Image: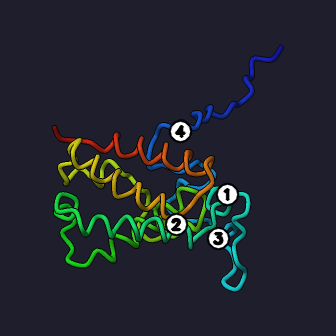
Amino acid sequence: MSNEQIPTSPAKPALDPTRLGEAPASLLPLTGKMPEAERPEEDEPADYADTFYGQVGGHETFSKIIHVFYQGVAADPLLRAMYPEEDLGPAEQRMLMFIEQYWGGPRTYLEERGHPRLRMRHVPFAVTPEARDHWLAAMRKGVDAAGLSPMHEATLWDYLERAAHSLVNSA
């Protein structure tokens, strides 16, 4: 036997699905930018068929969910107060980009805003259990409007509930 040791690479931590706001590693490069080799050509549409995003109808479906959700936000004084912008359009677009990316769609959120860091981005707001419940009620209307299959609806709703509970930061 030789005294030389075989170099080993450090073990990668296992993907922890409870780390909310973080897409699976295969969807979220650590650099904060999508590698050039992974970017679809401008005139070449990306294929999302093998992703949750593609299975549920892609942009059209997620756009409907988020738009109905933001209609609920606009009508709810508790939720509306958490949005300093007069126009909810930019917030709606940011959430749409995030949720599409999380479920395997375009990586626009990462390219424009960097890592999601959901907890950090919500720290400035007092997210109470009451606010969480209002958020979930508005999101429930959005999810219901999409008419997803029971399996897809349950998968999406499980994530949304866990995310909402994890963001509570005030009594």
Separation (CA) of disc 2 from disc 3: 26 Å
Q: Nearer the viewer, residue 115 or 76?
A: 76
Secondary structure category for the residue under label 2: helix
Q: Residue shown at 67%/57% (left/top)?
A: 51
How far across and down, in percent of the image, does residue 60 sit? 56, 73
Residue furthest out toward the right: 1
The reply to whether dot 2 and dot 3 touch (C-beta < 8 Å) is no
Q: Residues within 10 Å of mark 3 (few under 14, many from 20)?
A: few
Secondary structure category for the residue under label 1: loop
- Residue 52 lies left or right of residue 85; in this view the side is right
Q: Residues within 10 Å of mark 2 (few under 14, many from 20)?
A: many
Residue furthest out toward the top: 1
The reply to whether dot 3 and dot 4 touch (C-beta < 8 Å) is no
Secondary structure category for the residue under label 3: helix
Q: Residue shown at 37%/71% (left/top)?
A: 92
Separation (CA) of disc 1 from disc 2: 13 Å
The residue under label 4 is: 17
The residue under label 1 is: 51
Quarter containing the C terminus? top left
The residue under label 2 is: 62
Amino acid residing under circle 3: Glu
The reply to whether dot 1 and dot 3 touch (C-beta < 8 Å) is no
